[in-house]
Amino acid sequence: MSPASAPGKTLGRRAWEFEEKVVKEMEQQEAKKVMLSGIQPSGDLTLGSYLGAIKNWSSRAEQFDCYYFMADLHAITVRQDPALLRRRTLEQLAQYIACGLDPERNTLFVQSHVPQHAELGWVLNCYTMFGELSRMTQFKDKSAKNADNINGGLFTYPALMAADILLYQPDYIPVGEDQKQHVELTRNIAQRFNGIYGDVFKIPEPYIPKVGARIMSLTNPTSKMSKSDNGDTGRVTLMDDPAHIMKQFKRAVTDSDTQNCVRYDPENKPGVANLMTIYSAVTGKSMAEIEAEFDGLGYGAFKPAVGEAVVETLRPIREKAQRLIADKAYLEGVYRAGREKASYAAQKTLRKVYKKVGFLAP
Ligand code: TRP
């Protein structure tokens, strides 16, 4: 419809254009796709998760309606120290905000604050098969690692994860490779439920981001840098102080190349390639530029240069996280607002589910 023939003709051109803009914005808001992800508060975030994922999250809020939660219900499938779990949950929230996740534009909340997760989790347990749960590779891995505590929660964890997801009717679930199997199972559970009761759940897609570097351990460059590995030699976290970061980089594993050549060859020089990937991610330089920069200088110059670049990248993040951690009232405000928004959305789905399965209205 052209402005001239529009019903708003008498409004005058400026007013009409304004109205049109508002309507368009409202439509965009409604059409925004929903994205959700959960993160276990099991330790400080690593440089690997920052460069590989979180760094790119802040720009997502423009395009998607994003929910991120601290998965504390999941964390207790392995034994946790209560005071530490509480502290890490709060600190992880601070770290996310420090990385650029704006709480005004993303819904940030704590899983245990929204009881609908546990409630739908129970219901979905009854629509998830023993055989399906037995096939989950994470269950097999974790039960091998925690042989003295193979509890029921560890086994039924994927049904809770399905509830986490399906409550919010999301379009996309951004996850790493290791969680794809759980998202697949979530889709199967949702399809099974919908098959019995009609369209209750939206069927979500896994979302494997195109951008983001894959950062490996500094001491074992063929395995991923992880926050849950025992010992911290291969890892740098967002909260490490500069001296510690420098130490980690100075002792990073390279190779026995007698030329000490800084060359990008992930196959034959995985340690150097990993350091180059890190350096490239924090400086924006290409691999060719990095090779030229360190031509003839060797590892002795290269490793501390990577360390310094990482220190400068992480400095503002660490300082901001520290300021936020000191401001408990602010963080409480963030997770309370998040809980409110999340439970509103979650309750809408749960109410439908309870009705469908035949629970008497209270
Ligand atoms: N299982 C995920 C992990 O271990 C965390 C998680 C829990 C999650 N619920 C989720 C991720 C829902 C995405 C969506 O990393």
Image (cartoon, helix red, strand yellow):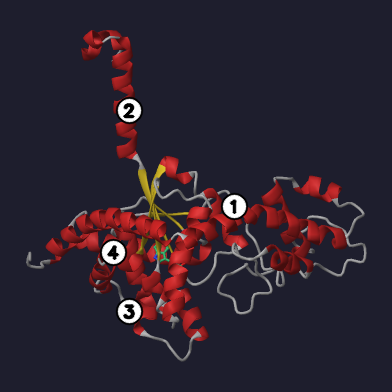
Q: CA distance from mark 3 to mark 4?
A: 26 Å
Is the shortest distance between ligand 1 and the CB of mark 1 under 8 Å? no
Disc 1 marks a residue whose amino acid type is Gly
**91, 136: nearer the viewer:** 91
Give the number of the mark in front: 1 or 3. Answer: 1
User: Mark 1: which secondary structure?
Assistant: loop
Q: CA distance from mark 2 to mark 4?
A: 33 Å
CB of mark 3 within 8 Å of CB of mark 2? no
**First in sequence: mark 1 or mark 3?**
3
Task: Estimate the x, y position of residue 128 in percent, counting from the top left.
Answer: 29, 72
CB of mark 2 within 8 Å of CB of mark 4? no
> Residue, x 69% and y 53% (percent of image)?
312
Give the number of the mark in front: 2 or 4. Answer: 4
Q: Quadrant of residue 347?
A: bottom left
Identify residue for label 2.
Answer: 24
Mark 4 surroundings: few (<14), some (14-19) or many (≥20) residues within 10 A: many
Q: Is residue 201 visible?
A: no
Identify residue for label 3.
Answer: 130
Disc 3 marks a residue whose amino acid type is Phe
